[in-house]
Image (cartoon, rainbow, N blue to C red):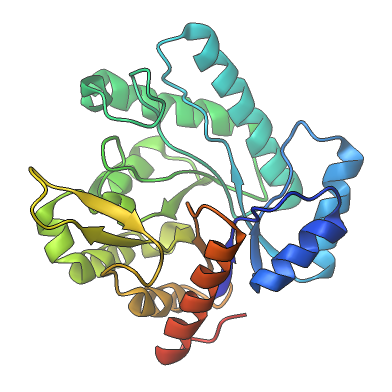
């Protein structure tokens, strides 16, 4: 498998970015500039990644396609198309977003997130984005979330069937789907189930830890620093590596450079203990 994550400290050139990537020990990266960067800047970072055998695992979108503000939703669609085109340009494994929230909080719960009409919009908008770009070197994917589709491996599998595009893939964030006591309690079996059901379609993986706070009512499950929770990340590396030696596994949502250093160190440690080679 390949290990990757975010680069938190500022950088102003491919050389400055690469220095951080090397310090963190990444062999997979999130592409470090967006589609609004000048063509020569995009090319410079792409050339740097290729020259240093860095797999570009993701290009992010992170906009709300379902914003109640019509102008914001239209801008999010345009940005999604631009970012998917960038992902195709640089040969990223995927261009990733969340499906979107019908409320003001862009990635939060809203009751309308689960209506039939919203599901149909997820399918249609995903198709439109893919058809607009017609990518041949990348895929479009949706990161699972606790309170919007896809929120289970079954709902993701159904979405794959309904979107019905070769360029639609799975970005697996199993921790985001640990949204109940039952799943938390049976987390190891749940993670294996995710890989068993979605394995052929997985192109990128987030490896995050989680911990439930005892006594919080009705339930409080928190994402925490890798190594500070209960997720079996060693087994995750085995499952990821079984998909292929270049499968990218990313640590994410950490506050600073030192936290990413610790997370990457922990992932390499559990991978070594699990007998998994990390590029």
**x, y percent for residue 101:** 36, 25
The answer to whether residue 119 is seen in the rendering is: yes
- Dividing the picture into quadrants, the one containing residue 81 is top right
Q: Which quadrant: the N terminus?
A: bottom right
- Dividing the picture into quadrants, the one containing residue 239 is bottom left
**x, y percent for residue 257:** 61, 60
From the viewer's perspective, is 243 left or right of 181? right
* Above or below for 152 versus 106: below
Residue at position x 63%, y 26% in the image: 79
From the viewer's perspective, is 251 left or right of 37? left
* Above or below for 49 versus 3: above
**x, y percent for residue 196:** 29, 67
**x, y percent for residue 119:** 30, 27
Q: Which quadrant: the C terminus?
A: bottom right
The answer to whether residue 134 is seen in the rendering is: no
From the viewer's perspective, is 151 left or right of 166? left
* Above or below for 207 versus 267: above
């Amino acid at each position: 498998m390949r290990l990757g994550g975010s680069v938190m400290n500022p950088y102003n050139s491919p050389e400055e970015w690469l220095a951080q990537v090397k310090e963190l020990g990444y062999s997979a990266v999130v592409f470090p500039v967006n589609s609004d960067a000048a063509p020569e800047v995009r090319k410079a970072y792409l050339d740097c990644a290729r020259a240093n055998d860095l797999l570009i695992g993701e290009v992010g979108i992170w906009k709300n396609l379902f914003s109640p503000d019509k102008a914001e939703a239209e801008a999010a669609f345009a940005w999604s198309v631009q970012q998917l085109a960038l992902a195709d340009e640089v040969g990223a494994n995927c261009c990733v977003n969340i499906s979107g929230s019908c409320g003001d909080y862009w990635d939060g719960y809203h009751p309308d997130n689960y209506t039939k009409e919203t599901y149909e919009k997820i399918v249609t908008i995903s198709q439109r984005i893919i058809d607009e770009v017609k990518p041949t070197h990348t895929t479009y994917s949706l990161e699972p979330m606790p309170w919007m589709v896809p929120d289970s491996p079954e709902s993701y599998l159904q979405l794959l069937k309904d979107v019905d595009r070769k360029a639609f893939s799975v970005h697996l964030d199993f921790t985001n789907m640990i949204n109940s006591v039952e799943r938390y309690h049976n987390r190891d079996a749940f993670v294996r189930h995710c890989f068993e059901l979605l394995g052929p379609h997985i192109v990128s993986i987030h490896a995050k830890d989680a911990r439930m706070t005892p006594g919080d009512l009705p339930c409080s499950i928190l994402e925490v620093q890798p190594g500070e929770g209960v997720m079996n990340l060693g087994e995750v590396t085995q499952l990821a590596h079984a998909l292929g030696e270049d499968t990218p596994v990313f640590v994410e949502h950490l506050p600073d450079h030192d936290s990413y250093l610790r997370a990457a160190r922990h992932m390499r440690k559990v991978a070594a203990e699990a007998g998994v080679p990390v590029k």
